[in-house]
Amino acid sequence: MTQQELADAAIMTRSHISHIEAGRRIPSKDDARRLDKALNTGNVLSNFLPQTEMAVADYFEPARLLEQQATVIREFALSYIPGILQTEAYARAVLASGFPPWSDEECDRHVVTRLERAKVLTDPVKPAVWALLDEAVLRRPIGGPAVMADQITHMARLAESGRVRIHTLPLDLGAHPLLLGMLSLMDFEDQPPVAYSEAVSVGRLHDSPSVVDRLRNAYALAMGEALPQRESLTLMRAIAKEFGHHD
């Protein structure tokens, strides 16, 4: 079968098939199941797929793997701080808010995974990380005032050190091009860029060039409406101080 014939049979894109063949991308469980069906191979590929020990939703696993390979990551957050920028206390508060609730042991596993993801920032240069935050993200008191004050201070220190760039979209801006959900854009040295979008209990990795281009343009438009980093940091410090006064 040609790549296109397999892509049509498995309901995947030809570029996605190409990346899997070249070893540039690890297929998700759903990818493996679709390929098994298209190739009439029973459960061979599904069983062969290495099982991750990371505690993440199935739909996020392909994006998590790519996150570790990216040279540039551009995040947009509408409701809460992006995972790779979260402190342990903030991550625990976010994860504890799900339904049905997890046991303490399950919550611990997910917190560990989130902190493992954040290790991409231990390298002083790569990946370059940009975070575009709706102001509501900074003002929502997830975990309480003390947790929020620490979380915002943590991000401000990362930005002031030059490790990440952070911009905020002020509340009084009103509507903007990314108002409908969270978005992550990833660039790589040896493969085309991808995008990942997420809503409640669903996430999708986009590798179609036209879709990725459209999402990158929406991100660029929203970034054009954001505060410069210096003003963003001033706002963040002020909000952190407000939370500190409530502690």
Image (tube, rainbow, N blue to C red):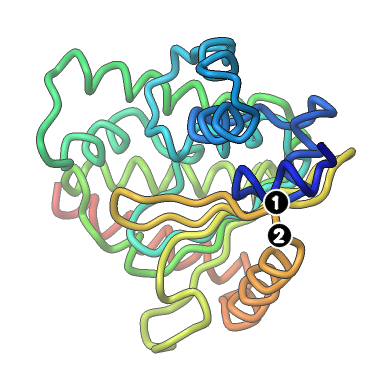
Q: How many marks?
A: 2
Give residue 243's mark. none
Q: Residue at x 67, y 48 (%)?
A: 73
Above or below 84: residue 141: below
Q: Residue at x 56, y 12 (%)?
A: 50
Residue drawn at (44%, 18%) of the image: 54
* Image position of 110 (left or right of 234): left
Q: x and y percent of residue 212 in the render?
A: 69, 63
Q: Quadrant of residue 210?
A: bottom right
Q: CA distance from mark 2 to mark 1?
A: 7 Å
Residue 234 vertical position relative to residue 129 in the rendered view, above or below: below
At horizontal 49% and vertical 13% (from top left) the residue drawn is 51
Question: Disc 1 designates what residue?
Answer: 13
Looking at numbered disc 1 in the image, what kind of residue is underneath it?
Thr
Assign a secondary structure to mark 1: loop
Q: Residues within 10 Å of mark 1 (few under 14, many from 20)?
A: some
In the rendered structure, which amino acid carries the disc numbered 2? Ser
**In this rendering, position of residue 136 left or right of residue 47:** left
Q: Quadrant of residue 241?
A: bottom left
Q: Which residue is mark 2?
A: 208
